């Protein structure tokens, strides 16, 4: 059985779900996404969102309202006569009238194991806080911040070598499959909902660039998770000889010394406890590169200091 759906999403993370819904026979009545923003080489050309690009290729109507609160926005939404709405990283609050419009409700794909990491940056926060696992959940939306009843979930282990983009890509694919299964259950009247627990609630605040500077006095694993949780954007950084360097990937290493001290000729850096070895980095104004390539052009001797 297929459903008539409105899809609401914006970034790359959302696209696999849109494509999977279409490939499984659901009718996409319309796609809602954020308005194009200036971009390109000179920052002058309007750049459509990844979801808009995908929707245009599918030949689906695309809407980019600045707000869903005006009566005319609600009327337009209702006119699509959708069975349900699927929301994946849309980036705009849905008023109660919009949530009530589809016959079967609005369903959100959230990239965490709710109620842990409600909010804007669940992928980054899970890595930065050293969580052993993450996942995706399909939730029937209400007006709260990711507080709706949960229908289905999939879990995924977080390893120390995972960056935010690694986890993002895996959860995006996992979530697309999960939402397809949820919509199939909804179509046959078999989607079961369960209230979220009141225990273990945490909030994933939007990443502030002020958080990106590396604190070398922390234990090595905490430093590694901080670096990987912010890779590739905004990128955790430190200064080497008064030049800013983003560190994008690293691994735990043996060694000890003063926090931030370079311990060998392979970019092993001492932390408050233990050490990390830098694997990939990016100098300010330069392309990202492997540490081995960086060292060929910029020899860094033991005893140098990252601050």
Image: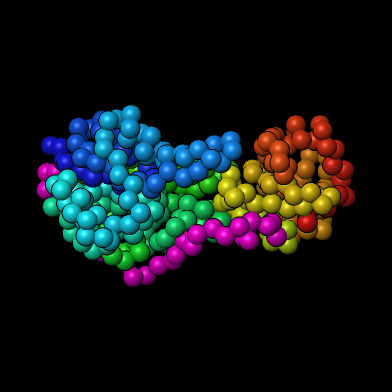
Residue 293 or 61: which is nearer the viewer?
61
The majority secondary structure of the magenta stretch comes to: loop
Q: Is residue 58 above or below residue 157?
A: above
7 on left or right of 199: left
In screen coordinates, is 190 left or right of 148? Answer: left
Work out whether residue 226 or residue 71 is closer to the camera in this orientation and state it. Answer: 71
What is the quadrant of the C terminus in the image? bottom right
Q: Could you tell me residue 36's position as x and y percent? A: 42, 43
Task: Decide whether residue 208 is among the magenta residues.
Answer: yes
On screen, 220 above or below 41? below
Q: Position of residue 156 (x, y in %)?
A: 42, 46
Number of callouts: 0
Position of 38 compared to 153: left or right?
right
User: Is residue 192 visible in this depiction of the protein?
Assistant: no
In front of the other: 290 or 285: 285
Is residue 252 visible in the rendered image? The answer is yes
User: Which quadrant would residue 292 be assigned to in this image?
Assistant: top right
Residue at 69% across, 51% down = 237
Residue displayed at 46% across by 39% down: 47
Q: Look at 26% across and 52% down and name the residue there.
A: 107
**Residue under the image location 57 percent in, 47 percent down:** 233
Which stretch did the figure color magenta?
A: 187-215
The x and y percentages for residue 53 are: 38, 34
């Amino acid at each position: 059985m297929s459903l008539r759906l409105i899809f609401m999403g914006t970034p790359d993370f959302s696209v696999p779900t849109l494509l999977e819904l279409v490939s499984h026979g659901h009718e996409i009545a319309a796609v809602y996404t954020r308005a194009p923003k200036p971009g390109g080489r000179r920052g002058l050309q309007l750049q459509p969102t990844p979801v808009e690009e995908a929707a245009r290729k599918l030949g689906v109507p695309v809407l980019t309202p600045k707000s869903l609160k005006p009566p005319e926005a609600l009327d337009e939404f209702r006119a699509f006569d959708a069975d349900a709405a699927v929301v994946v990283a849309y980036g705009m609050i849905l008023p109660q009238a919009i949530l009530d419009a589809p016959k079967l409700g609005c369903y959100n794909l959230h990239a965490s194991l709710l109620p842990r990491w409600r909010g804007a940056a669940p992928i980054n926060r899970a890595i930065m806080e050293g969580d052993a696992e993450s996942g995706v959940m399909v939730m029937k939306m209400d007006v709260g911040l990711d507080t709706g009843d949960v229908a289905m979930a999939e879990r995924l282990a977080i390893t120390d070598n995972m960056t935010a983009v690694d986890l993002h890509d895996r959860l995006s694919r996992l979530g697309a499959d999960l939402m397809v299964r949820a919509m199939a259950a909804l179509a046959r009247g078999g989607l079961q909902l369960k209230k979220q627990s009141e225990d273990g609630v945490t909030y994933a605040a939007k990443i502030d660039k002020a958080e990106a500077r590396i604190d070398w006095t922390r234990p090595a694993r905490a430093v590694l998770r901080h670096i990987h949780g912010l890779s590739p954007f905004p990128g955790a950084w430190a200064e080497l000889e008064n030049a800013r360097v983003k560190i994008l990937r690293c691994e735990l290493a043996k060694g000890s010394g003063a926090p931030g001290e370079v311990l060998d000729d392979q970019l092993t850096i001492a932390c408050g406890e233990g050490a990390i070895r830098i694997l990939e980095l990016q100098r300010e104004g330069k392309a990202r590169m492997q540490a081995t390539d960086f060292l060929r052009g910029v020899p860094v001797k033991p005893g140098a200091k990252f601050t």
